[in-house]
Image (cartoon, helix red, strand yellow):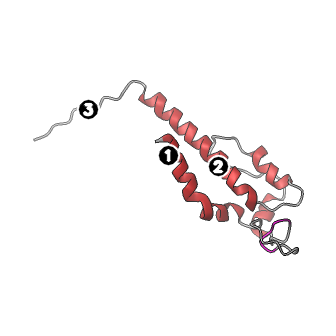
Amino acid sequence: MMRFTGITFDPDFKKRSESDFKNAQEFIDREVLRRTDPYVPYRNGILKESGKLGTVIGSGIVEYIAPYSKDQYYNNKGKGIDGLNASNGSKGLRGAFFFERMKADHGDEIEKGAKEKFT
């Protein structure tokens, strides 16, 4: 028979684990912004910049705050500069569903980076 009466944690465990979680979340937020950058539709850079302005690093929420962000996310046809369907013939990444497409391309790398740095 085995009997467990309790677990004793290192006194600094809570403080250390909270700090590690905070640092990991900040890393993930920064990586999401950095890696999404080439996917964001671009005319004059305001939409791209609105992601940096609308995101509180470490909050776990990356938010694009330009008034037309939602419309561009769902409806952009990728015909602008470095777009998926650019009229100048260049084949870029910019267009609709930019976060989902970035996540499909780089989500595993972001997760791996966070695990390597913070576990």
Tag 2, which secondary structure?
A: helix
Circle nearer the viewer, 2 or 1? 1
For the residues labelled 1 and 3, the Cα–Cα distance comes to 30 Å
First of labels 2, 3 by sequence position: 3
Above or below residue 28? Residue 77 is below
Residue 15 percent across, percent down from the top left: 48, 28
Return the x and y of residue 115 as percentages of the image width and height: 49, 47
| Disc number for residue 116 | 1
- Image location (x, y in percent) of residue 20: 51, 36
Residue lying furthest left: 1
Q: Which mark is residue 26?
A: none
SS for tag 1?
Answer: helix
* 10, 112: nearer the viewer: 112
Q: Tag 3 or tag 1, which sits nearer the N-term?
A: 3
Mark 2–mark 3 distance (CA, rounded to whole Å): 39 Å
Name the amino acid, label 1.
Glu
Amino acid on which the number 3 mark rests in the picture: Gly
Q: Disc 2 versus disc 1: distance between alpha carbons? A: 14 Å
Choose the circle earlier in sequence order: 2 or 1: 2
Q: Residues within 10 Å of mark 2 (few under 14, many from 20)?
A: some
Residue at the farthest top position: 11
Magenta stretch: dominant secondary structure: loop
Query: Which disc is residue 31 wearing?
Result: 2
Circle 1 Cα neighbour tier, 10 Å, few/some/many (<14 / 14–19 / ≥20): few
What residue sits 36% from the left and 27% below the top? Answer: 10
Which residue is found at the position 68% from the left and 55% from the top?
A: 35
**Image-quadrant location for residue 36:** bottom right
Specify whether 6 is left or right of 94. left
- The numbered dot on residue 6 is 3
Q: Nearer the viewer, mark 1 or mark 3?
A: 1
What residue span does the magenta drawing correspond to?
Answer: 81-85
